[in-house]
Amino acid sequence: MDERLNHAPCGYISITHEGIVRDVNQTFLDKMGYKHEDLVEKHFESIMSTANKLIFHSYFYPFINLNGHVEELFINLKDNTGQSIPHILNGRRFVHEGEEVIDCVLVQMGKRIDYELELRTAKKQIEEAYWEKDQAHAKLKQIHKEIEHKQKELMNMNSILVELSTTDKLTGLRNRRFFQEKLEEHIIQFSTTSEPFSLLIIDIDHFKQVNDTWGHQTGDDVLENLASILQLHSRADDIVARYGGEEFVLILPHVGVTDSKIIAERLRHAVAHASWKTGNLTVSIGIATMDSNDSDVTLLKKADEALYFAKEHGRNRVIHCIDMNE
């Protein structure tokens, strides 16, 4: 490895498409307390928690496969003591000596940790100040001001990080992680209230042809415009999210089988009659409505099977899973 890259002011890891670490710079090893042999030829996910492995599989790999790069992925990695250290990850895929590799640049979110340490230090100073005599009151006022300032900064940083971790960067919609959390919440609510809700999976027809003919920038524009159409034609309490690639998902609270078909058909019609740079553009939609035997896995599977059925039977159509055998 080039000496400058080896001691760059940020971490660097090169992994195969399967996640095996091929190379790592000294900066990352020093910051995380590892030796070269601890990571090289090991799986990158060996220093991730289960939650972060799910993030990596649901966001990093699909995005790399689709676009060849990932930007500003917020992820926690474990150091040699097992402590979870937050990082911002940028990655890019290319072929090196006949092997497909992914180069990753990792920047520690140390500032956030520093704020938390400063808060704990300030609180400790408050406790000590109560035992002071002459200058106790002046000192307490100053410390309180510092705490308020640091708390505001930390709250702002946390709110930004939460928003980033649940938002799809390209379309501005909620991402797969947020959708999964909301789906689980609706299933729990259904178990107590039996209030119906429906799930839509929307897929752009022949999207690969859009990228191949018009280029990936136009493909990104199509995804952004479709996201806007879905938001425009959704209710305030509907959950609209990008599921990955050209697939989008909607959770429709308080909507049963009949109304879900009407809503989905309205969305399909809006897309088909919109103005597109690429000419005609259509979507296929699969629907499943929650029942007492469903879990998040089975509900998604039903909607996905309905989508596949719509694709197999001509595309540009809406199929509810209960109608597949008719």
Image (cartoon, helix red, strand yellow):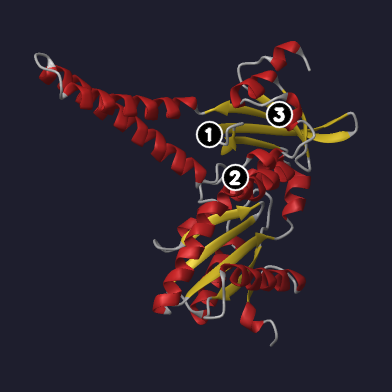
Q: Residues within 10 Å of mark 2 (few under 14, many from 20)?
A: some
Q: Name above or below for residue 57 compared with residue 110.
A: below
Q: Secondary structure at mark 3?
A: strand
Give x and y (percent) for residue 242. 57, 53
What type is the residue that disc 2 sits on?
Ser
Location of the C terminus by quadrant is bottom right
Residue 246 appears in the figure? yes
The residue most toward the bottom is 326
Give x and y (percent) for residue 27. 64, 19
Residue drawn 61% across the image and 65% down it: 201
What type is the residue that disc 3 sits on?
Ile
What type is the residue that disc 1 sits on?
Pro
Q: Is residue 237 left or right of residue 265?
A: left
Residue drawn 50% across the image and 53% down it: 178
Circle nearer the N terminus (2, 3):
3
State which mark lies toward you, 2 or 1. Answer: 2
Identify the residue position indicated by label 1 in the image.
86
User: Which label belongs to residue 49?
Assistant: 2
CA distance for labels 2 and 1: 12 Å
